[in-house]
Amino acid sequence: MTFSFNIKDIQNKRHDLINKLNYVTDDQEKKDIMISLRNYYYMLMFSDSFLRKVLYNFQNRKYKNFDCEKTQNDTNYLQYLVEIAEICRHGHLDSYYKELDRKEITLDETIKLTKEFFEFLGDDEYCTYVDKILNPNNHLLHIRKKQILCDRLHGLAINDFINRNSYCVMQEKNTLWDMKTLCHELIHAIEFQFNKKINASIHTNCFGYKEVPAFFIEQIIKEFIFSTKYYFRFKNDIEQLLKNRTISIKEDSIDIMHEIFMTVAEKRSKENRTDFILPEMRSVTYDIKDFYESGDIEAIMEEKLWEKLQFVGSYVISRTMANIYKEDKLKGLKLLKKIMSVLSPSEMHKVLLEYDITEDSLISTSKQIYPEYGEYQKIR
Ligand SMILES: [Zn+2]
């Protein structure tokens, strides 16, 4: 099987969008077109028919400034997210991000496993759509051996917001990583396809929360492996993959807290205040209340940090959702669908509340992620 985009078709669609841009007056529609155009550039690049440098400049020039969702200005909500990041930054320091060394899965097997996984997940509509993307004749999936942008990026789902098409690209590694990547990207495509309300700016503004369904799916892959004939073959691999995810979440959390404290420290030093001492990030626990009380929280929250906070928060939410799925498959699937239909963090938390998932219960889930948290709590 060969999976590749149809370059001619992509170029045609791109030209149609460029033409459309000339007469569209609605701002939202313009944004949708611009982002879809950028996405077609991506696809040309990933299929090696376009220069990487050209694309990079194009993207940086045009798509930097988007308004973030206003939940960002809710101090209590930010405190909640910062608290989660603060908890998540504690954990195994000796653990590290690891590639899987087994090289024993062919592409055919990856495709087969992926289809079986979606059958296991239990939604017929999703299965039909997954079959469509995984049919090489439809050219919706592009698989390449070479890296995609950077070594941590193994796949991408790419949307055309005008024609409402979704495409996936994946780097083939011939390990279980391929199946995880494919399932992760497919759920992004499913979210886009089954949620007619999504437009480009919403998808960009909620960047971090976009990962909730995908992180959830990663947890369910473990359920799938553990309850099927694949247990002996893939048990260790799936555990390593999930461990890699928690490591990346911890690293993001360290970055967030580092950024926050560096900014506060700089401000304090300008004010000649000596009561705030910058802690050594990896070993000392500081009192987070000092930060809240300083009133600096909104000021420091730049778009980049906000996205990372959402990313960490999403992971904690996905773990809680997976626990619900483990206890009651139908209930978990229904929750997933509801989460995929919301358009903002505040709407998402409303849905979570319907399932008794409060911010407090999410904070307690985050404490279970790293076993060392107990130690941190003692100091606190
Ligand atoms: Zn993703």
Image (tube, rainbow, N blue to C red):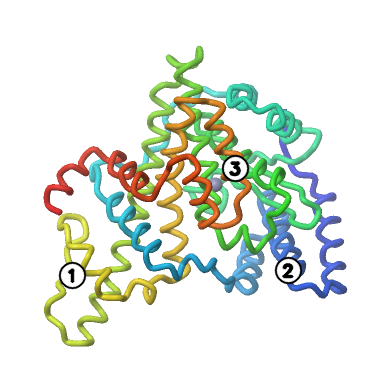
Give the class, few, some or many, for how many residues have Cα within 10 Å of label 3's Cα (few <14, many ≥20): few
**Nearer the N terminus, badge 2 or badge 1?**
2
Q: Residue at x 42, y 65 (%)?
A: 305
Q: Residue at x 33, y 48 (%)?
A: 363
**Nearer the N terminus, badge 3 or badge 2?**
2
Q: Are the residues at dot 3 and dot 2 in contact (C-beta closer than 8 Å)?
A: no
Give, as a three-letter code, the residue at label 3. Answer: Lys
Query: In which image quadrant can residue 327 be found?
Result: top left
Q: Residue at x 25, y 44 (%)?
A: 91
Q: 373 or 113: nearer the eye? A: 373
Q: Are the residues at dot 2 and dot 1 in contact (C-beta closer than 8 Å)?
A: no
> What residue does disc 3 label?
338
The mark found on residue 109 in the picture is: none
Q: 324 or 204: nearer the eye? A: 324
Give, as a three-letter code, the residue at label 1. Answer: Leu
User: At numbered mark 3, what does the secondary structure look like: helix, strand or loop?
Assistant: helix
Q: Are the residues at dot 3 and dot 1 in contact (C-beta closer than 8 Å)?
A: no
Q: Is residue 246 left or right of residue 91?
A: right
Query: In which image quadrant can residue 18 be found?
Result: bottom right
Q: Position of residue 188 (x, y in %)?
A: 62, 44
The mark found on residue 278 in the picture is: 1
Q: Position of residue 111 (x, y in %)?
A: 64, 26
- Using the image, determine if residue 176 lies above or below residue 57: above
Give the class, few, some or many, for how many residues have Cα within 10 Å of label 1's Cα (few <14, many ≥20): some
Q: Is residue 367 left or right of residue 240?
A: left
- Using the image, determine if residue 71 lies above or below residue 166: below
Quarter of the figure with the C terminus: bottom left
> What residue does disc 2 label?
28
Could you tell me how far apart the alpha carbons at marks 3 and 2 are, in whole angstroms? Answer: 24 Å
Mark 3, ligand 1, within 8 Å: the answer is no
Q: Residue at x 51, y 22 (%)?
A: 224
